[in-house]
Amino acid sequence: MTNSKQNNFSRIALVGNPNCGKTALFNQLTGSRQKVANYAGVTVERKEGRFTSPQGRSVTIIDLPGAYSLNATSPDEEVTRDMCMGKYRNEAAPDALICVIDATNLRLHLRFALEICRLKRPTIIAMNMSDIAKRHGIEIDIPKLESILGITIVPTVATQKGGAKTLLDSIDHAFKIPTIELTDETDLHVEVRNLLLECVKYTSQTSTAFNEKVDRWVLHPIVGPIFLLILLFIMFQAVFSWAQPFMDGIQDLTTWLGQQVAHLLPDGMLQSLIVDGIFAGVGTTFAFLPQILILFLWILCLEESGYLPRAAFLLDRIMASVGLNGRSFIPLLSSFACAIPGIMATRTIPSAKDRLVTILIAPLMTCSARLPVYALLIAAFIPHKTIGYFFNLQGIVLFALYVLGIATAFLVALILKKGKSSYENSLLLELPAYRFPNIRSIIFGLWQRIEIFVSRVGNIILTVSILLWSLSSFPKPPAGATGPAIDYSFAGIIGHWIQPFFSPVGFNWEICVALILGLAAREVAITSLATVYAVGAIDTDAPTQLIHFLSSQWSIATGLAFLAWYVYAPQCFSTLAVIKKETGSWKIVIGTTAYLFFLAYFCSFATWHIASLFFK
């Protein structure tokens, strides 16, 4: 295929380094006409959208995963390489490529552009952030650069409305096959240096000076970690405080919808299934969506601003002490809201072993679903008193539970990696220029997370909710039964059956029922305990009533043992399903469940016996 005045390409791939604005450009071109899926046979996320060219052609555009090089070191980069080279499974190669580069960081991004040029495929270079480059005194001789490379270069500003118009206007006629001659032996670093000398002038160092000034503090070995710690503290406070009104709203809406359905349906099994099974189960899970979205809002803002790679850099030394590196930080951070997005975020980790170890320890981060259980048990068994004039004892215990999960995760990683960190796993990250987060990209990112949450979690929770409703509803209590209905159900029967196994850790059969129902979602354990102890919606203050029952009927040792169990409790079904999806191995799912169960049982056993010596 030769360069031509008219292109009829209908399938175009968007490629570029991470942090080049590629996804923002994709959103500009496609708007809402996009979908998110996975590439065939792998769990790497696939974004595909459609738009209409100026000449009325329907064009499909694929947003390939960000890559620093076609010499792939991670699953993301492997997909990008194989798609660009037309070697991805049975999928046809894209007709043309749009290579997005950051005009403010040409030294890094031009190298990848040269790799794309070496493929000799119809290509356009989208020189993004050209407005920022101009403000920072970076003068780029685009005609000369076009002449050397032999392809069209289009300035874009993906963060501004209409910033992709020039690129869109070029779609029908500007694709060209690069004419620059590059072989496998060509030193691309030398080529980039020559291009910069010939085509780029720096009339000001404002941007570099500003970044260096900020980084002097942000990356400082003492000030940097303190700043990161304060930022994370504020972030977690926001996750749990900002989300509460939205969570209450979702729960109220679910309750209202359930009541409306209850009024429309006659009393009976169908009403119970829909109201008590579907609305209660799925509604409880979706109530935690605001926390996940707020956490992702912070992560997206930190990523858009350019700070997130710096946070990973700061934590690299800590991660290296257990055989990992800073790339594991972001997945583990995400796991504090929910282990599911955290496990999914491990795809960007180059090393397969590091990726697997991060997946295995992500469930040890204290997810938001544990918080209701922690709050209930701490209120029931830990006195509300002040220590040292400033610290609340209940708050100290809650903090200790978080620290215990993190410390155990590092210990597990140390054992699995045997303390070794190889050169190939060393952290190499681009530190992009600081910039104001793009609102449009953040909104699109949050919307995509909603779709992923609903599609991948909603179906699982719906199925499990129906199953658990069946277990707790059948068989019905015999005539004249005085105990709660759940005592006679399959769930109650199973609870009595497995209770002897858990008696060495101080658990009664009621707790065993909570453990069963908690496999659907951690917070379901509270509903289970409320049902067992006959605390329902008719109570004026159901939480206080449940706290009273627990503190009066359980020993302090039992309460503390149950807290210890929930630090390590085997994951909910949806998390296990995602682990299977990401690893493709049932052995890993079974192994993860087994080691978490062992930790939970051992720590509960130790906690119960030690606490029994001090609390009678």
Image (cartoon, rainbow, N blue to C red):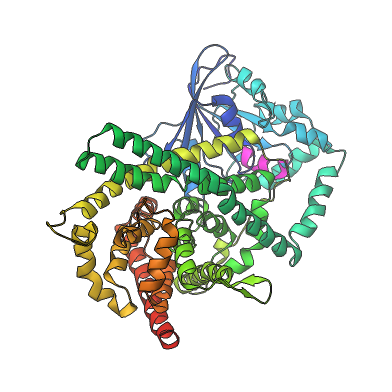
The residue nearer to you, when weighing 603 against 89, is: 603
Image label count = 0
Tell me: residue 410, above or below residue 151: below
The residue positioned farthest toward the left in the image shown:
479
Q: Position of residue 272 (x, y in %)?
A: 25, 43
Q: Position of residue 274 (x, y in %)?
A: 28, 40
- Residue name at image x 16 percent, y 60 percent: 481
Magenta stretch contains residue 572: no
The residue positioned farthest toward the top in the image shown:
55
Magenta stretch contains residue 113: yes
Q: Position of residue 405 (x, y in %)?
A: 49, 68
The residue positioned farthest toward the bottom in the image shown:
613
Quarter of the view holding residue 539: bottom left
- Residue name at image x 61 percent, y 51 percent: 238
Q: Is residue 607 left or right of residue 178?
A: left
Q: What range is drawn magenta here?
A: 106-114
Where's the C terminus, which quadrant? Answer: bottom left
Quarter of the view holding residue 598: bottom left
The residue nearer to you, when weighing 218 against 137, is: 218
- Residue name at image x 42 percent, y 79 percent: 607
Residue 497 in sight in this render? yes
- Residue name at image x 61 percent, y 68 percent: 318
Q: Is residue 148 left or right of residue 427?
A: right
Q: Position of residue 535 (x, y in %)?
A: 35, 58
Q: Is residue 152 left or right of residue 518?
A: right
Residue 139 in sight in this render? no
Chief secondary structure of the magenta span? helix
Tell me: residue 325, above or below residue 444: below
